[in-house]
Amino acid sequence: MQLFCEEFDLDPLSRPLTVYGGLAFAGGPWNNPVGHALATMVDRLRGSDDAFGLVTANGGNVDKHAFGVLGTAPPPNGFRHDCPQAEIEAAATPRKVLQDYSGPATVGNVDRDARPFERAGALPGKLPSPHRAIGRGRPAPTPTSWPLR
């Protein structure tokens, strides 16, 4: 949801952004959160004459993204499908992952109870610069920072 809000310039507190809760509420990536989101969106749209819903999904590492626009009426120009991957890759500006970073970072992922991961391991971190780093170690006492080493 953080990436979606950032890319679409949405205030995450302005309205509910999910009908199902997202990956963190589905119990993990192999529990089919997108299938549940699609089914929930269909239930929400049924009974409306002119309603639309947007369902999105990413490839876990945010290397693939899919979306579907559902509606209660057929599209006026029929179903459309596109695969803009070549244009997306040509326009992308990848962020560098620093290999030897040491210092403060913001936690990029949390578990489904909105807590930073509680055991040692790798953790993606957002840095004060536009770069990223992978942290290893134990969490700091605060829920939004993890010293990377």
Image (cartoon, rainbow, N blue to C red):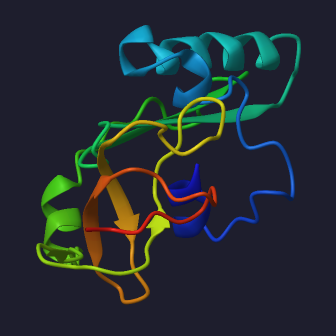
| Residue 91 pos. (x, y %) | 22, 76
Q: Nearer the viewer, residue 90 or 3?
A: 3
Q: Nearer the viewer, residue 40 or 148?
A: 148
Q: Is residue 66 above or below residue 46?
A: below
Task: Give the quadrant of residue 52.
Answer: top right
Outermost residue on the bottom side: it is 129
Q: Relative to residue 124, is residue 92 drawn left or right?
A: left
Q: Relative to residue 40, is residue 35 drawn left or right?
A: left
Residue drawn at 16 percent across, 65 percent down: 89
Q: Is residue 103 above or below residue 134?
A: below
Q: Is residue 69 above or below residue 7?
A: above
Q: Is residue 135 above or below residue 95?
A: above
Residue drawn at 44 percent across, 20 percent down: 28
Q: How many marks?
A: 0
| Residue 51 pos. (x, y %) | 80, 31
Residue drawn at 32 percent across, 37 percent down: 60
Q: Nearer the viewer, residue 15 or 96?
A: 96
